[in-house]
Image (cartoon, rainbow, N blue to C red):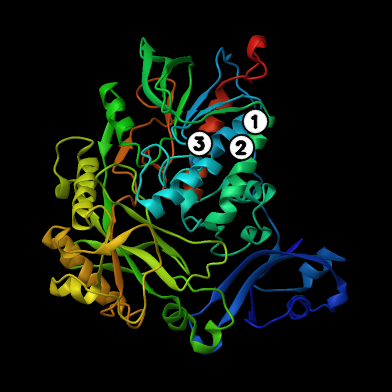
Amino acid sequence: MIRISQLKLPVTHTKEQLLHKIGKMLRLKPESVTDYKIRRQSIDARRKQDISYVYTVDVEVREEERVLGRIKGNHISRAKDVMYRFPEPGERILHHRPVIIGSGPAGLFCAYLLAEHGFCPLIVERGKPIEERTEDVEKFWKENILNPDSNVQFGEGGAGTFSDGKLNTLVKDVKGRNKKVLDIFVRHGAPEEILYQGKPHIGTDILRSVIQNMRRQIETWGGSYLFHTCMTGMEFSDGNLEAVLCRDTVTGQTQRMETKIAVLAIGHSARDTFYMLKEHGFEMEAKSFAVGLRVEHPQAMISEAQYGRESAKLLPAAPYKVTANLENGRGVYSFCMCPGGYVVNASSQEQGIAVNGMSYSGRNGNNANSAVIVTVTPDDFGRAGALSGVEFQRSLERKAYALGNGKVPQQLFGDFEQGKISTGYGAFSSEIKGKHTFGALHELFPEEIRDSFCQGMHKFAYNITDFDRADAILSGVESRTSSPVRIVRSEGFESNRKGVYPCGEGAGYAGGIMSAAMDGMKIAEAIAGEYKKYTRQEEMHCG
């Protein structure tokens, strides 16, 4: 196959024009191209008057060597792909099944690979299956009745289930894990376009069905799930894991599961689990993260700013990414931007409010929203130990709850700067899932963080006109941007307690669906490379 990169076409191009451009670059008639496959598609919007799609394509032609021999150029080469390879099984015998704590992207992909290769994992999830979890989330948004174990944070699929479903990552991938994740998603119902889009996303609606399909495949391969089951403790012998202790969140019954391997794919909101791990002597450390507010603008405004008025009519809802480094040393940046999306109440604890953003696959909501967040370090929340960042998050969420009297507090940006409570929306209204009210968000943060947020909003207006418009809608608090804790692990991915593998975003090693999934794959590879497949006869069916 011949790979062509930097192949540009206008946004209105057809498949026939793409084929014609391929032939032109290879100096061939279109009929000489026997097949082609799109490897990457992105939008080049640097010049508003000349916006184009940019492709990388792999092309199959007759007499490939002759064509490559006479074509010179930096954008034409022989196609080379990194093929993902799962390791051969190790030599150690598994007397008990590996237990995976959490079914977010990290736990899901760790379980998927282990199940596919004969390790019969047991997935322990404190929340509910997607079907039941979705009902709980919708009820919470409508009635403001929170289920602490089944919500936007907890349940099958993890926090990413109710998000924009972004599938891009900045993680360097030399093993082919990134493509493997996308291939698995497509195999279980995601659109094939995610395999080549420059900024792929799946949307919360499609992601839910994909996760269900992956669960069914894991069960077919011999894995199994325990839903509404929360890990409450562990047992060790000579520093090695012996058992995991769990509690049924519905009945309150406890059970002991013997195992030598536990994967901690617990997610960034498993605060009670962090404290339990601390009591068990796990080595942990506080880490920097970021806090701020979710900001809404009209999607039409964002699309016109990014693409120009005419192209905006032809292209999908535009995303954006903005960053600024301030003189006070803080960074301010957008996070989890949702084109055509919704602000959602993402709370998971009583007496606390946390927000996030969510989009459906069509990204056809009226507003664009993004978190605008300010970096914070242990200097901001004290040096009282590894869990000081957790307490800082919790204090902000409790304050947001009080400011909104139990609802999501909102404020227009102009009023936020002036320190007065808003009395109504401006030229557009909020697109939000959950009960909400106007409140004094300007009282939420320490002064330096509040001022940094305002400075960032004004700086971003240099990149996106009217980003700092007075009627931009703010919702708070955006506190769950990443885990405030890192569970220390070795080069072999184990914690200081042998047999326990910290994994994914909650453990401090990922920052989104893709990076968490890829980290889960690493853990599965480490386990498989050391142990034989699970073949204990009395538990062969992993029931």
Q: From mark 1 to mark 3, how far is it between C-alphas?
A: 14 Å
Image-based side of 240 in relation to 324, left or right? right
Mark 3 neighbour class, 10 Å CA radius: few under 14, some 14 to 19, many 20 or more:
many
Residue appearing at x 46%, y 31% in the figure: 228
Quickly name the residue at label 1. 219
Q: Amino acid at mark 1?
A: Glu
**Residue 461 visible in rendering:** yes
Quickly name the residue at label 3. 107
Front residue of 379 and 229: 229
Residue appearing at x 34%, y 24% in the figure: 496
Classify 95 as above or below 164: above
Residue appearing at x 23%, y 52% in the figure: 401
Quickly name the residue at label 2. 215
Residue 300 marker: none
**Residue 74 visible in rendering:** no
User: In terms of sequence position, does the residue under pointer 1 or pointer 3 come before the other?
Assistant: 3
Q: Nearer the viewer, mark 1 or mark 3?
A: 1
In which quadrant of the rendered image does the C terminus lie? top right
Q: From mark 2 to mark 3, how far is it between C-alphas?
A: 11 Å
Q: Under tag 1, what secondary structure?
A: helix
Q: Amino acid at mark 3?
A: Gly
Image-based side of 416 in relation to 253, left or right? left
Where residue 205 appears, x then y in whole percent?
Answer: 56, 55
Image-based side of 525 in relation to 19, left or right? left
Q: Amino acid at mark 2?
A: Arg
Classify 123 as above or below 420: above
Residue appearing at x 44%, y 31% in the figure: 493
Q: Under tag 3, what secondary structure?
A: helix
In which quadrant of the rendered image does the N terminus lie? bottom right
Residues under numbered marks 1 and 3 in contact, where contact means CB atoms less than 8 Å apart: no
Residues under numbered marks 2 and 1 in contact, where contact means CB atoms less than 8 Å apart: yes
Q: From mark 2 to mark 1, how far is it between C-alphas?
A: 6 Å
